[in-house]
Amino acid sequence: MERVKVLIVDDHEVVRYGLSLLFQQYDHLEVVGAAKNLEEAMQLMEQYRPKVVIMDVRLKDSSGIQGCAEITSRYPGTSVIMLTSFGDDDVVLESIRAGAKGFVMKDAGNLELLKAVEAAIRGESMLDPTVTGRLLEHLRRSPWEIPEEKVKLTKQEKRVLALLAEGMTNKEIAREIFLSEKTVRNYVSNILSKLNLSNRAEAAVWATKNRMYLRQ
């Protein structure tokens, strides 16, 4: 089985070292590099074309958002997972718009980070539940732009969207509501189309802001 290439981008050496050790425990993952800044990251991207990039939201030489946007633009086959910490709420939405596939708190457990990586490998997005909760507070201060026209989601689509907002993967949603994973993928695609959103992360934020609508 071909190993999945992973690139780590963080300006703290201890974080780069710790994440490298973590991923080396899994035979299906291969850490191809650990960059301390965006310049190094782009060089490694060109050399290895990793499937997944783990990137700190804040880097010393540039914004992690800038890095995320540059990577997703030049390498559309790569999924970027942002590492965030308390106080980064103001940049999470910008990261979503830049193409980030997921967000994990820096103090999250190893299993949470691995779960985000596995979701990214499948082409899915994942928001750390803690990030989702804090985003709601952020959105109350700076409202998410919601289409003016009335949104028309089916009852099942609302249910899928609510579970997606809880951080569930397609596989977990399928198990929860007794559907095939393919059917759930189709529901997610329809939801994104109806809401005019780009990815699951945006959908999760939209759902968090519009919980009352999902309960109707």
Image (spheres, rainbow, N blue to C red):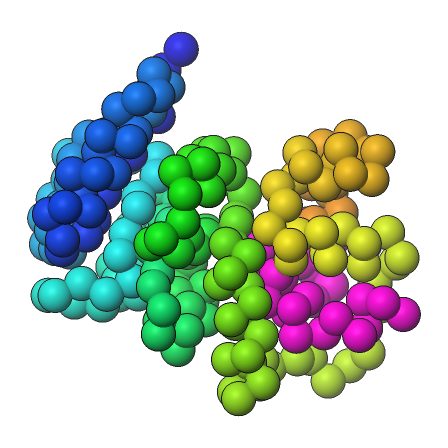
Quadrant holding the C terminus: bottom right
Residue 38 percent coordinates (x, y) = 15, 56
Q: Nearer the viewer, residue 17 or 160?
A: 17
Horizontal side of residue 176 vs 70, given as left or right: right
Identified at 88% across, 58% down, the residue is: 154
Is residue 170 depicted above or below 145 in this figure?
A: above
The residue segment tinted magenta is 189-216
Which residue is at 58% across, 85% downward? Answer: 140
Q: Nearer the viewer, residue 50 or 216?
A: 216
- 211 is within the stretch colored magenta: yes
- Residue nearest the observer in this picture, 119 or 135: 135
> At 72% across and 41% down in the image, what residue appears?
173
Question: Within the image, what quadrant is residue 193 found in?
Answer: bottom right
Across and down, in percent, residue 172 comes to: 68, 37
Quadrant containing the N terminus is top left
User: Taking 163 as reference, is 97 left or right?
Assistant: left
Give left or right: position of 53 versus 163: left
| On screen, residue 192 above or below 123 | below
Query: In which image quadrant can residue 51 be found?
Result: top left
Q: With 111 as the anchor, is 198 left or right in this view?
A: right
Name the residue at 30% across, 29% down: 23
